[in-house]
Each structure stands twice: as C-alpha cells, then as structure tokens.
Image (spheres, grey):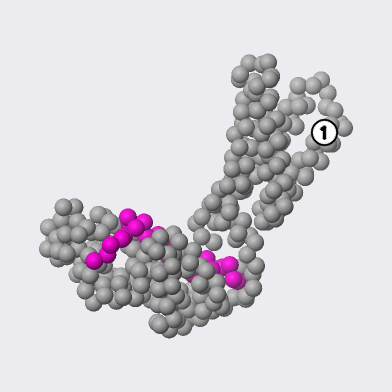
Amino acid sequence: MNELTKLGKKRTILISISILLVSIHTIYFYHSVRPEIESKKLIQQIIRFSLTVGLLIMVYKGKNWAKIVSIILFSLALLGALVGLATLDTPFINKTPLLVMVFVYSMAIYHFGFAKSFKEFFKFQNTEITESIQDSKEIMESEKFWRIIEITKSESSGDYEKQQSLLERELLKLTAKEVLEFDNKFRTLKGEIYTWDFWAAAYIINRGCSDDCFSDFRGWLIGQGKLVFESAVQNIETLSELKETNDGDWEGLSYIPTDVYEKKTGNDMPQGILENFEITGEEWEEDENELKNRFPKLYAKFGME
C-alpha cells in the first residue's frame, strides 16, 4: 500500500467517524429539546444510524454502489443543513451544529467523489488477489530489468509521476516472484551507488540532500535508464548532462514493486535480498569549495553559482 493509498484509507476512516458523530449528535439534540423521548422517532433514528454504519462499511470495502449512494445522501444532508442555516431564526451560536454538518458533509462529498487519495484507496480495495506469497533471493536478469525501466521512461516523456504509474502497469504483468526479483535487482543497484560521490552529486543537484533524499535520488537515477545509470557509475560527472532532474522530487519509484507485490498477494513483500547500507568512498564536507573542486562539471551545472 503506497503513501497515497494509506492517506486515502486514513481519511476515509476519519470522515466516516465524523459522519457517525454528527448523526449521534443529531439524535441527541432532537430528543434533548423535548420534554420526553419519542420512542417511535428514536427507533427510526437508530435504524437510519445502523444503515449509515453499514453504508460506510461498504464504501470502505470498495463497493461502487455504496459510494454513489453515500454521495447522494450526503448531498441531500448538506442541502438540508444549508437550508437550515438560511431559514432558522435563532442566534448564530445556536447554528454551530449546522455549520459542523455543512463542513463534515462537504468534506465527505469531496473525499468520496473527487479526492485522489480516496480513488487510490478505492482502487486498492477492488484489486483482486490472484497469487499466493512467493519468496525469492534471485535477481532479475539485467536485460529484462532495464527493458522494463526503458519502457516506463520512454512512455512517460519525462513525467516522473507518470513513470511510476507505468512501472506499476508493467510489474502487474509479472508474477509475484518476478516482482520480488525485480525489486531485488532494484535494491542491488541502489546499494551499488551508495557512495559518497553519488551523495555529493545529489547534494549539488538539489542544493542539499538528507539521507532520505539520497535514497530517493538513487531510485530516481535508476529510473533514468541503463545508459544514464551506467555512465554515471563510470564517471559521475556525466550527470551534468542531465536536462531534467524533476526539481529534486525523487520520491516514489522505489515503492512501486512493494505496492504491486502486495496487490498481487494481499501480503507484505518478503525480505528478499538485503540492500547494501555500508556507504563507500571518500567522505566530503558540506563546503562549497570542496564540492566545486571535486565535481567541477556538476557544480558548474547545478551549483549555487
């Protein structure tokens, strides 16, 4: 489950809880202003509340009909709250519950109908699990690996977010075991360039780079294709020839294999091979002159000057 899907799940739960709290408050408020509880009305309200709970559960499970019905019902509830705000002759402070209803139902309509995070979560909930858990310590053959990367790079036309979607498409064509082997190769390559020189390159290109940023940079660099990657391994200054660096927004590509494996099996990806986390090479200081002297081409292209 990628970060956007997790965000969609979290917001779906929070909005659902908010709707239920509004419903509970509405029931309480209705009876609190009356001399005695109206049993028949209370039973009707409890039944409606139970149906709302069931509807929200169906939305969470990814049922399209439930999503459509919920948007219609919440739109009607929003309209009712707006009419109440406009017509009730009462001090503004007493209209606070209606304002809360307007806010909650508006958020619900937007989330279920338009939010990208919910669409990702909804798609995830409707992904059919077709394979059992498969583990492997094997590494995908280089030609096959780079062919997949080149397809995504070529078709994305420099759009990094689109490249991530294309990589997901290509990996979904593979078996779960092959997806793990792809990830094994990906993490092997990331480990090979876990060096001080590559960290310096990321630092210069982005004008600063944390360890998380450097991890994302290495994943992004693999996504640039075999020629760019292997040329940089031979001579890191060739990165000065890059025409596009996505403004340092390098996060995303490394997560795709894990997400696809989970979609295929319904389980977390096994450990596979261990990525190298022992940095190699000559350490550098965050000093402008040192970086400029060690990597003159990179600094001339991307440095502060």
Identify the image quadrant of the N terminus: bottom right
Q: Quadrant of residue 176?
A: bottom right
Q: Amino acid at mark 1?
A: Leu
Q: Quadrant of residue 25?
A: top right
Residue 160 at x, y percent in the picture: 40, 61
Looking at the picture, tell me which residue is in the foreground, 189 or 69.
Answer: 69
For the stretch drawn in magenta, the main secondary structure is helix
What residue is at 54 percent from the left and 51 percent from the top? 116
Looking at the picture, tell me which residue is in the foreground, 10 or 229.
Answer: 229
Count every numbered label the image shows and give the total. Answer: 1
What residue is at 69 percent from the left and 19 percent from the top? 88
Left or right: residue 129 versus residue 292 is right
Residue 125 in sight from this viewpoint: yes
Q: What residue is pinned by disc 1?
A: 42
Residue 25 in sight from this viewpoint: no
Residue 107 at x, y percent in the picture: 59, 40
Residue found at the very far right of the displayed protein: 40
The question of residue 264 being in magenta is answered with yes
Residue range of the region highlighted in magenta in the rendering: 241-265
- Mark 1: which secondary structure? helix
The question of residue 211 being in magenta is answered with no
What residue is at 58 percent from the left and 47 percent from the top? 114
Residue 32 at x, y percent in the picture: 75, 24
Residue 16 at x, y percent in the picture: 65, 44
What residue is at 61 percent from the left and 37 percent from the top? 106
